[in-house]
Amino acid sequence: MTGFIHQLKKAELHVHLEGSVDPETLRELDPALDEQKLKELYAYSDFLGFLRSYKWINLRLTRPQHFALITRRLLERLERENVLYTELNLSVGVWLWRELEFEPYFEAIAAEAERSPVCVRFIFDAVRQFGLEAGWEVARLAAANQSRRVVGFGVGGDEARGPIKELQPVFDWAKAQGLHLAPHAGEVVGPQSVWDALECGAERIGHGIRSIEDPVLVRHLADHEIALEVCISSNVCTGAVTSLKDHPVRRLFDAGVPVTLNTDDPPMFGTTLEREYQLASDEFGFGEAELRVLAANGFKFAFDPAVRKMDR
Ligand code: ADE
Ligand code: ZN
């Protein structure tokens, strides 16, 4: 299956740039980091532990060149995995909270995207628990940079601490500006969180795995062709599912929900996109024809309209 998975033309719709930093690169950025600290940093038993490490890594990215380096490394990895198209989540909500100056940081990332053979688009993520005003700032930047490959607006962070409905006016405005909407929802909070995201206009759902707890929602996602950005290893590592075998990816797929496979924060969850496909095959019995469907969905549900026709 390895050769088959490799040769599949793939798209990745849910990967965080700031979560793509591997321990070796982190040590390049901060040579003072010792083995023990690195080990602790990449190990967590729950979602909040993961978010703490994610924040810690974000804080190590202090210069535009750091963002250039991690973008280059991520895109090189995606290219090696035969990923033709990606939508990179940028935690712009975290940048603003850190008072980083947007332009030099985004320019460093955009310049690397320009150089890569991988077709790159960006989704700017606000942070749920940072509230409405902070959300507005992220959406304004996303809208203002649509000519520089920004196609979407989303929201990440602590799902339990920031009800998405609070951001409804921001989502409405972002949509009216021509942005697509792909918030995280139903990752660690139940189906109501996905319903709320849909009411905010979500076109795809980041994770959305807890939709499985509500048969009406499952039917709604299938009938309305709302894709889930499923990240199996992420869900195991953050404790969003109790164990790998309990992951609902197979049940969602069989119920007709459009599923895409993604990595979320690949080195933080010890994974790659090819490994996620391998897991689907080894652990959930996805055969070649089904893996082809998963790969095609990555193109079919892309936000760039030209890419929707680019698969295979
Ligand atoms: N930011 C990076 N990864 C995330 C995740 N899995 N959930 C919410 N916010 C995130
Ligand atoms: Zn994510």
Image (cartoon, rainbow, N blue to C red):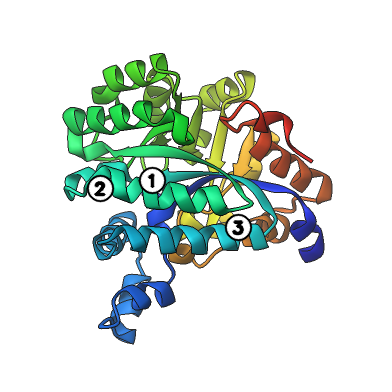
Residue ID for mark 2:
95
Work out whether residue 89 or residue 116 is closer to the camera in this orientation and state it: 116
- The CA distance from mark 1 to mark 3 is 16 Å
Q: In this view, does 211 lie to the left or right of 39?
A: right
Q: Where is residue 128 in the image (x, y as percent from the top left)?
A: 26, 37
Inspect the image, locate mark 3, and give the three-letter code of the amino acid beneath it. Answer: Leu
Q: Which residue is drawn at 56% across and 20% down?
A: 220
Q: Please name the residue shown 34% across and 85% down the image.
A: 35
Q: Which residue is drawn at 26% across and 65% down?
A: 60
Residue behind mark 3: 78
The image shows residue 111, relative to residue 217, as above or below, that is below
Q: For numbered disc 1, what is the local secondary structure?
A: strand
**Looking at the image, is mark 2 or mark 3 earlier in the sequence?**
3
Q: Which of marks 1 and 3 is nearer the N terminus?
A: 3
Q: Quadrant of the N terminus?
A: bottom right
Q: Distance between the residues labelled 1 and 2?
A: 9 Å
Label 1 beta carbon less than 8 Å to ligand 1 = no
Sequence-first disc among 1 and 2: 1
Q: Which kind of residue does numbered mark 1 sit on?
A: Leu
Q: Residues within 10 Å of mark 1 (few under 14, many from 20)?
A: many
Residue 45 drawn at (x, y percent): 35, 65
Q: Look at the numbered discs 2 and 3 and tell me whether their residues touch, using CB distance below 8 Å.
A: no
- Whole-angstrom CA distance, mark 2 to mark 3, is 24 Å
Q: Which of 200 and 84 is in front in this view?
A: 84
Q: Are marks 1 and 2 in contact (CB under 8 Å)?
A: yes
Which residue is under mark 1? 90
Q: Residue at x 58, y 62 (%)?
A: 76
